[in-house]
Amino acid sequence: MAACATHFIDGREASHYADKAVADDLAQGFDLVGHLDLPAGWSTDFRPAFLSLKDLSQLTQETNHQVIKEVEDSSQFLEELWQKSLDEVSKGWSEGPFREQDLPQGAVISKRFAIQQGNKVRPIDDLSQSHINEALNMAYVAVKDPSSGEVRFFRLLCLPFGAVAAVHAFIRVSLAICHIGNTFWHLPWSSFYDDFTLLSTRQLATSAEASACFLLDLLGFEFDRDGDKAAPFQEVFRSLGVEFDLTDSNKQIFRIQNTAERTKSLVEDLAAFQEQGASSPKTWNRLRGRLHFVAGQLSGRLPKTKPPFAQHCRGYDIT
């Protein structure tokens, strides 16, 4: 791992990437709490923390009890969450499972829950409830053991999916990787958090893929080498939930559209909404989020006309 960190530092320096601290921060580990320094080359977007570290420690005991109670009462995706938590331990991403009496004084506990994304279940760590996000070493997530019903705890050793500071760190590292790949391998790619989209001419597709894989291996990053996230080069491909059509690229035309599955699912949800004539706040928020995503290819203009209605519907059944 030390060699990979050295390669990252050397690549950052040789490519003259503006964010000089990103390689050192990656090697040392990114902070989840405290002030986030503005990386060189970034525009200022100051967002003050709602809590100091001192305030966070004072709230810990109260919020920990609340989190544990909610996890005890949970009943969704128990098997999936437990197995994914154990998988993270085997990969070295976390430690555990621990019992409550084994936790150190001052441990901050966050709830882990799951969301369904297509046919996959993704674990999310709610660091807002535990106030980690508000304060921006002692981070644990609570997961219910489906075999015993007991709440167990895992100590996070990597950036959790759900922390404000983690998003900041993901973007910094991804942009640095893109810059190094573009500078030395001339890779025409882009990144969105930890998803990379790579374009190539037909003649250079094999070389482009090999170069991208070599760079990620050189820098020590694990990545999908097969499956949905590692599809072969095609004129029509999917990335970030939408479909890109490059069949007319020789005419300097490309098309972006929502996937057929996403469109079909949304039409079915809208038909059900029309048939029932009402919706719960939870169902409405899910539908609203999907409408926002679908309308994004129209620059988000349609959803922006509806915020008063959306705000009004948050706490009421909708008819």
Image (cartoon, helix red, strand yellow):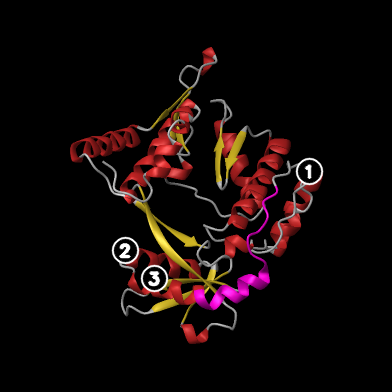
Q: Nearer the viewer, residue 145 or 198?
A: 145
Camera-side mark, 1 or 2: 2
**Which residue bears the numbered disc 2?**
76
Is residue 20 rendered magenta in the image? Answer: no
**Which residue bears the numbered disc 3?**
70
Residue 231 numbered mark, or none: none
Is residue 54 rendered magenta in the image? Answer: yes
Tags 1 and 2 in contact by the CB under 8 Å rule? no
Instruction: Provide the residue span drawn in magenta.
Output: 46-62
Q: What residue type is labelled 1?
A: Ala
Marked residue nearer the N-terminal end (1 or 2): 1
Q: What residue type is labelled 3?
A: Glu
Q: Which residue is drawn at 53% across and 70% down?
A: 94
Marked residue nearer the N-terminal end (2 or 3): 3
Give the Cα separation between the discs numbered 3 and 1: 44 Å
| Residue 126 appearing in the image | yes
Camera-side mark, 2 or 3: 3
Q: Position of residue 52 (x, y in %)?
A: 67, 66
Residue 18 numbered mark, or none: 1
Give the left or right position of residue 120, taking residue 222 as reference. left
